[in-house]
């Protein structure tokens, strides 16, 4: 009698185990697989939306920078054609130099890209801004300290080429 009860318990336990395996394999496994499929598709959609948004934002930033550079080029053309800003009028100690510096401040305010707009007359040794006159050597020593990586053009080379350029400095 005791052996019969043990056999019945083992048999019932085996049937229960088989029942649980069937339930798990027929109900739980497909549910988990479907959840994984939905999760993977959802992650792909989120990644695609994020990538599209980032590409759009980068495109807008590139357009904005291009517009700023076009504005800078137009401003350079205006400054070069402005009869109120000439080497003669920028000479130190004259009332005309005060007016020319004010004009440089107006251009800087219109441009609104830089903290300070420096104007260099080709062949000259000074930089002119709305704040006053600064020599190139003083500028290089105190304002803009350049660490020269090998193979890159120096600041003096930019100055000697007499082309419009922009420096961005923090501080």
Image (spheres, grey):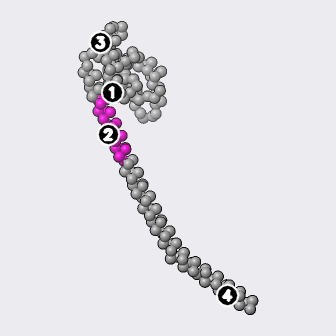
Disc 3 or disc 1, which is closer to the eye? 1
Which residue lies at the image location 27% right of the left edge and 15% below the top edge? 84
The answer to whether residue 44 is above or below residue 164 is: below
Structural distance between the alpha carbons of marks 2 and 1: 17 Å
Structural distance between the alpha carbons of marks 4 and 2: 80 Å
Which residue lies at the image location 31% right of the left edge and 15% below the top edge? 100
Q: Which one is earlier in the sequence, the residue at label 4 or at label 1?
A: 4
Badge 3 local density, few (<14 within 10 Å), some, or many (20+)?
A: few
Q: Which residues are magenta?
A: 55-73
Q: Which one is earlier in the sequence, the residue at label 3 or at label 1?
A: 3
Q: Classify mark 4: helix, strand or loop.
A: helix
Q: Classify mark 1: helix, strand or loop.
A: helix
Give the left or right position of residue 39, taking residue 108 as reference.
Answer: right
Give the left or right position of residue 119, taking residue 139 as reference.
Answer: left
Where's the N terminus, which quadrant?
A: bottom right
Q: Which one is earlier in the sequence, the residue at label 3 or at label 2?
A: 2
Name the residue carrying label 2.
63
Give the number of the disc on residue 111: 1
Disc 4 or disc 3, which is closer to the eye? 4
Pick the front one: 40 or 107? 40
Pick the front one: 19 or 87? 19
The answer to whether residue 136 is above or below residue 151 is: above
Give the number of the disc on residue 8: 4
Name the residue carrying label 3.
88
Residue 53 position, x and y percent, is 38, 48
Disc 4 or disc 2, which is closer to the eye? 4
Instruction: Label the magenta part by its dominant secondary structure.
Output: helix
Structural distance between the alpha carbons of marks 3 and 2: 38 Å
Badge 2 local density, few (<14 within 10 Å), some, or many (20+)?
A: few
Q: Classify mark 3: helix, strand or loop.
A: loop
């Amino acid at each position: 009698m005791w052996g019969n009860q043990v056999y019945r318990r083992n048999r019932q336990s085996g049937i229960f185990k088989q029942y649980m395996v069937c339930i798990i394999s027929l109900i739980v496994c497909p549910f988990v697989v479907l959840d994984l499929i939905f999760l993977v598709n959802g992650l792909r959609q989120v990644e695609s939306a994020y990538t599209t948004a980032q590409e759009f934002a980068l495109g807008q930033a590139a357009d904005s920078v291009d517009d700023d550079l076009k504005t800078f080029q137009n401003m350079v053309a205006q400054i070069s054609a402005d009869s109120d800003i000439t080497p003669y009028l920028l000479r130190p100690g004259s009332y005309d130099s005060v007016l020319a510096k004010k004009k440089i401040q107006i251009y800087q305010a219109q441009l609104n890209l830089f903290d300070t707009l420096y104007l260099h007359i080709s062949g000259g040794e000074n930089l002119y801004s709305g704040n006053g006159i600064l020599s190139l050597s003083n500028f290089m020593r105190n304002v803009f300290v350049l660490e020269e990586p090998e193979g890159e053009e120096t600041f003096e080379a930019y100055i000697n080429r007499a082309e419009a350029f922009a420096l961005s400095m923090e501080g």
